Image (tube, rainbow, N blue to C red):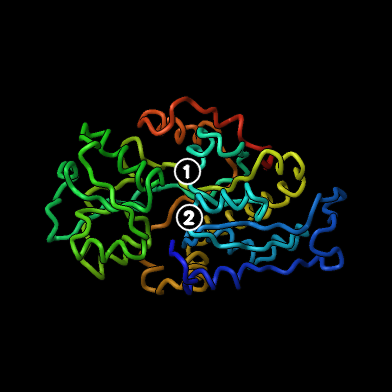
Amino acid sequence: MRNATRTPLTAALVAALALPSSCSALGGDKPADVAGSPLETSGLTVSIISTVDLAPLWAAQDAGYFAAECLNVKIDVAQSGNKTMTKVIAGEANIALTTWTLLFKAQSEGVADFRLVADATTATPKSNKIVTVPTSPVKHVEDLPGKKIGITSRNAASDVLTQSVMRDRGLDRSKVEWVPVPLPNMADALQQGRVDAAYMPEPFVTESAHTVGAIPIVDVGGTGSTQNFPLTGYATTTQWAQANPKTIAAFQRAIAKGTHDARNDRGLVERLVVKYAKVSEITAKLRELPGYGAKLDARRLQRVPDTLLQLGIIPSAIDASRMIVRQPTS
């Protein structure tokens, strides 16, 4: 997630996902008709974080699934999961792609009343790791207390899952110096000694292994309480969800189809990340993929607020099931 200057990845996402609707006669904000049931609006703005793990969204766009649902989807690329939620709260976007940890933290603080629309990614084995470099004083996960650990931001998945890994092993989290670093700069921070270890998702794990000789010390997505942990998903405000149930259902159907394609065609995912995220073909072939999901499961998602509560990040329990909007039946 980069700051003021628009990156090639950001520009590509904006250009590629400004999807014209096949229901052009309806206009951008007039009701559309799908299977005899009019949508509240065909114009839909989705605010996303700049990430390579948008394969289901790209797949839905390329295959025309949004257009088939009479949705004119406009994509807004924000700098962070907090920013995407802010845009939804302000009415600048309708749906936000965000990190679940940040969303439940915001819900606990009363920032807004959110409703959860669709799943996106999960930390599968080997897709998210804590890494170090040969020159670092960190050689094993037990060395983390007292060291500088690179994360994207406090309360983001990188922070929460690193703390969970340490808690599982009885390590003192209070002695860590948490250093926020944008993911594209994380490998340099390791090499330059600005951090002693870093949380990285793919493709940064694969890229940093080649560029700075990064070495994994723990597989976050494949061990302990963080195994297959829910990472990101789509959400909106309660007010917008209540006013636009049919539009949400149309979005869910399109994302579900894109997710099905991404889950069942590794080659498609590789082509999409090369095309839209500008990842090299070699990295695209070598990287471990996250888990792609569309339909939200309340029991699985409950792991997120429960973990935040256990770590003392939120003060009281949150029932995820009460926040989930109606999910597709198939």
State the count of labels.
2
Q: Nearer the viewer, residue 300 or 73?
A: 73
The residue pinned by badge 1 equals 102
Residue at 31% across / 43% down in the picture? 162
Residue at 57% across / 54% down in the picture? 259
Residue 134 in the image: state x and y as whole percent.
13, 60
The residue pinned by badge 2 equals 80
Task: Please indicate whether residue 117 sits to the left or right of residue 182 in the image.
Answer: right
The N terminus is located in which quarter? bottom left
Q: Amino acid at mark 1?
A: Leu
Give above or below for 278 relative to 140: below
Task: Please indicate whether residue 70 sits to the left or right of residue 294 in the image.
Answer: right
Give above or below for 61 relative to 151: below
Q: Nearer the viewer, residue 173 or 301?
A: 173
Q: Mark 2 and mark 1: span between their CA atoms?
A: 10 Å
Dot 1 alpha-carbon crowd within 10 angstroms: few under 14, some 14 to 19, many 20 or more: many
Q: Where, by quadrant of the figure, is residue 261 drawn? A: bottom right
Residue 242 in the image: state x and y as whole percent.
74, 39
Q: Nearer the viewer, residue 84 or 70?
A: 84
Residue at 84% across / 56% down in the picture? 32
The C terminus is located in which quarter? top right
